[in-house]
Amino acid sequence: MHVLITSDTVGGVWTYTQELVTGLARAGHRITLVSFGKLPAPHQTEWMQVVSGLDYRPTEYRLEWMEVAERDIEESRRYLQLLVEEVQPDVLHLSQYCYGDIPVGVPKVVVAHSDVVSWWVAIHGVEPDDTPWIRRYRQHVSNGLRGADLVVAPSGWMLDEMATHYFQPDRAVVIHNGRTPAMFDPEGPKKDFVLSVGRIWDAAKNVQLLLIAGQNAHMKIVGWEQEPGREGKEALLSGRENIELLGPKSQAELRELYSQAAIYAATSRYEPFGLSPLEAAFSRCALVMNDNPVFHELWDDAAIYFRKDDPDDLARVLEAVRRNPVMRQEYSSRAYETAYKKFTAGQMVQDYERVYQDVCSSARVA
């Protein structure tokens, strides 16, 4: 089967794409990959060297959630339509909503990775103001969902958000994101520190919770990026000798940190899935998680939860897990076993193969 996949090079969607494309290619499928947004850095495309027959088409068209993107959306829709005519794929796998209704005679699978409105509600507690940008964005998402032959989301919560804020798709399924277990080291000797991944200033990742309360644990936070106009690293760490802001790390560097960390703190208040907790689970870290519906849906009793967005309770739970090695070992094993059972890249690839077959079969019948 020939699958045309769209992606962007920012954050978890690119990691998801790497796993999916690699798995599909190994299963014998032909892949055309188109990326939007920034051109990838060389380290972001190293994985392609071992993917046989991949046809990669990088572009710099702006992404649909950006405020000044209308011209880019129009041009990229035309570009994608022409590309479909050129390469003649069997199915389109779209990681952006705005391409779900392009007029092509090829079945379309639209993946709801996240969206602006559900993000805004999670952060601010209310829907965003009805500005021209938001109206345009809502229209793009709604039209894309209507135009899709199938909508996929990484969690049931994310599917519900689509129905709440935009449109209830006629055909929709949950396919969990996955990672390759062999990429991580679950047997490494653990050290007494708490790891977390996320930009300090990002309200969705909510890593600030680790800086608010009096934490006794040694903490390492990956993903430092100073937001323009905000306080510097030194101000954030004033009087906090137990906290290290490590900055962005490569996948190899992250794997080493995961293998050493005894506990992973998942602080996000908005997380339609969450690849970092999954990577920590494959490394046998005990998961301490914010009390949000997605984490409960995915991890259930394989994680320990602190009261939603409560830094004091986070500090209490972290200390309790640190001081109880039996509990920590039990939950690290639960996390690993749950990840292996539910969230492997192999399972994700098989699930997508199944839906590709389904939408192609339905299209032939129609």
Image (tube, rainbow, N blue to C red):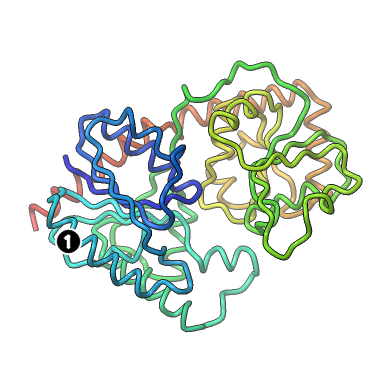
**Residue with the mark numbered 1:** 82
Residue 240 location (% of width, % of height): 87, 43
Residue found at the far front of this picture: 42
Using residue 221 as the reference point, say whether residue 92 is left or right of it.
left
Residue in the image at 28% along x and 54% along y: 109
Q: Quadrant of the C terminus?
A: bottom left
Q: Quadrant of the N terminus?
A: top left
Using residue 116 as the reference point, say whether residue 334 is left or right of it.
right
Image vertical order of residue 62 relative to residue 334, above or below: below
Q: Secondary structure at mark 1?
A: helix
Residue found at the far left of this picture: 365
Residue 302 location (% of width, % of height): 61, 33
Query: How many marks are shown on the rendered structure?
Result: 1
Residue in the image at 68% along x and 47% along y: 224
Using residue 115 as the reference point, say whether residue 286 is left or right of it.
right
Quarter of the view holding residue 81: bottom left
Q: Which one is in front, 76 or 173? A: 76
Image vertical order of residue 113 relative to residue 329, above or below: below
Using residue 237 as the reference point, say whether residue 161 is left or right of it.
left
Q: Which one is in front, 228 or 111? A: 228
Residue 330 location (% of width, % of height): 67, 23
Image vertical order of residue 318 relative to residue 164, above or below: above
Residue found at the far right of this picture: 239
Amino acid carrying mark 1 in the image: Leu
Mark 1 neighbour class, 10 Å CA radius: few under 14, some 14 to 19, many 20 or more = few
